[in-house]
Image (cartoon, coloured by chain):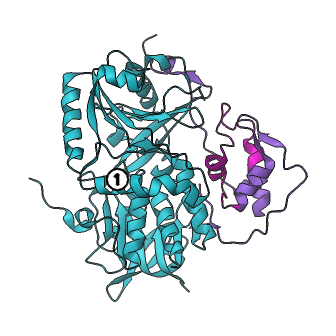
């Protein structure tokens, strides 16, 4: 799923907010202010914000913060959250040891 | 009515973003059209190797130029830490056949003055003490290294955008058109028209279909490659790893996670109708087994994610770069064959220089579209 985004469209200046210090991605300790700032630097999709800041890239893979990150990006862009594509969920569902992963079919 | 700029780039991967940056820096107006999002394809899906060793000699000068002149200052230039680390590349062998492969690779690159040499198993374990006793030798190139592919791609994009380059994502180019014999227009799926004096196609495997609308046929096919990443770990070793058998590659990142990629045999036969970036059941398990053959010490480290992506495999294994003689105004950068990330800075600089009418930093003549001939 992709969405038409003209990255030259003005979204206004970055305006600091009182709760910018709030930690949104707990695994990687990324704050609301950092996410908002990344949007102003051009990261306009969840995946771009993730790759730029590591929000949603930690142990839980965004299962905790994904919806909140999406809401913050959408609000900054003046869009509805539903209009933005989500992150892609990937295997494994839970972290798995290399030795177990490599042992398919053996045990 | 068409939107106009001096240069139009199709594809916002690292090549598209970096070329846009080097053009914008020269004051040239540039628009980048991307069907998905910034860095959607191989640029964000590779393991971040910055390697000169084991390169085809036709693209080795681009790798050496990138390492000597562009990678070291890139973080400073872009204002983003691209995590470039010049920590060496060690390519491992387990058998005498592997050592023969390594010997050929080393001899090939030495001709161009690259410092790369064969080392024994003991020397290899001195460089990287964590590897298995079964490693009998390796090639070692101290000036190779790695970088963060995600941040490099987005860093080029961010800086190009700051300098005024226009990026439009979710705007898929379906057709190019000529005007008086020269490449001039791009038409998108949404029906929008864009015009420019120069059009650069840098759209990964999709470059073939896009260029074909002007009768240019790049002999490349797509191949599906997969990677995995582990949880963060204390520092083990910084070197970029590879093997003579090409069964896995990767490194430990600044974050502490290990990023590994590798082949399992299904790469050319992936189901194209599947969701285009779905992972397969075979690949991560196969990679895990191969990694543990060389590094049994990593056996209890946990994998948090695997992913896949299409790469653009060219007929002769090196990319097609630069202006196309048959169609003035058309430029290509495709067919990187899975090793485009490390050379991307030099490639992008040369493309921008050629478009701007300057002499290119590296000679591209052996990598142009007109090089292909029958081989039998």
Nearer to us in this view, B48 or B72 = B72
- What is the x, y in percent for residue B367? 26, 62
Which chain letter goes with mark 1? B
Q: Which residue is mark 1?
A: B64
User: Which stretch is magenta?
Assistant: A41-70
Residue B229, compared with residue B372, is above or below; it is above
Nearer to us in this view, B84 or A34 = B84
Residue depicted at x 48% and y 28%: B237
Of all residues, the one furthest to the bottom in this rendering is: B180
**Mark 1 residue element:** helix
Q: Give the drawing colour for chain B.
A: cyan
- Residue A64 lies in the magenta stretch: yes
Q: Can residue B39 be seen at all in this image of the molecule?
A: no
- What is the x, y in percent for residue B286? 40, 26
Q: Give the drawing colour for chain A.
A: purple
- Residue B82 lies in the magenta stretch: no
Would residue B17 appear left or right of B319 to someone viewing this image? right
Q: In which quadrant of the rendered image does the N terminus of chain B lie?
A: bottom right
Residue depicted at x 23% and y 28%: B98
Counting labels gives 1
Residue depicted at x 54% and y 60%: B156
Would residue A47 appear left or right of B366 to someone viewing this image? right
């Amino acid at each position: 799923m992709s969405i038409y985004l003209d990255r030259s469209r003005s979204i206004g200046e970055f305006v600091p907010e009182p709760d910018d210090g709030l930690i949104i991605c707990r695994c990687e300790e990324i704050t609301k202010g950092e996410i908002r700032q990344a949007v102003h630097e051009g990261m306009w999709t969840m995946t771009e914000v993730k790759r730029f800041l590591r929000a949603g890239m930690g142990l839980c893979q965004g299962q905790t913060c994904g919806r909140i990150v999406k809401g913050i990006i959408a609000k900054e862009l003046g869009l509805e959250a539903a209009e933005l594509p989500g992150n892609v969920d990937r295997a494994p569902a839970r972290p798995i040891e290399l030795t177990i992963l490599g042992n398919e079919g053996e045990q | 009515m068409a939107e106009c700029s001096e240069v139009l780039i199709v594809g916002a991967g690292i090549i598209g973003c970096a070329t846009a940056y080097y053009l914008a820096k020269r004051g040239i107006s540039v628009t980048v059209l991307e069907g998905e999002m910034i860095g959607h394809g191989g640029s964000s899906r590779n393991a971040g190797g910055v390697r000169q060793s084991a390169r085809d000699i036709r693209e080795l000068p681009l790798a050496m130029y990138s390492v000597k002149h562009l990678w070291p200052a890139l973080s400073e230039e872009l204002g983003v830490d691209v995590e470039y680390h010049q920590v060496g590349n060690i390519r491992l062998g387990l058998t005498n056949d592997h050592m023969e492969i390594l010997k050929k690779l080393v001899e090939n690159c030495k001709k161009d003055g690259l410092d790369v040499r064969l080392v024994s198993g003991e020397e290899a374990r001195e460089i990287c003490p964590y590897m298995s006793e079964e490693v009998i030798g390796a090639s070692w190139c101290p000036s190779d290294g790695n970088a963060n592919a995600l941040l490099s791609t987005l860093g080029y994009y961010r800086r190009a955008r700051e300098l005024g380059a226009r990026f439009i994502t979710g705007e898929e180019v379906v057709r190019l058109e000529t005007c008086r014999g020269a490449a001039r227009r791009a038409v998108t799926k949404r029906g929008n028209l864009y015009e420019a004096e120069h059009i650069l196609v840098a759209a990964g495997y999709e470059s073939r279909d896009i260029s074909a609308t002007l009768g240019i046929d790049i002999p490349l096919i797509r191949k599906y490659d997969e990677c995995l990443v582990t949880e963060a770990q204390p520092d083990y070793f910084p070197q970029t790893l590879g093997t003579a058998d090409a069964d896995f590659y990767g490194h430990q990142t600044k974050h502490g996670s290990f990023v590994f990629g590798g082949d399992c045999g299904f790469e050319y036969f992936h189901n194209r109708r599947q969701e285009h970036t779905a992972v397969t059941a075979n690949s991560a398990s196969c990679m895990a087994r191969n990694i543990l053959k060389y590094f049994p010490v990593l056996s209890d480290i946990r994998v948090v994610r695997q992913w896949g992506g299409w790469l653009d495999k060219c007929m002769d294994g090196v990319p097609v770069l630069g202006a196309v003689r048959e169609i003035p105004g058309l430029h290509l950068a495709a067919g990187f064959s899975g090793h485009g990330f490390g050379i991307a800075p030099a490639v992008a600089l040369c493309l921008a220089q050629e478009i701007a009418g300057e002499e290119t930093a590296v000679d591209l003549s052996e990598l142009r579209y007109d090089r292909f001939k029958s081989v039998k």
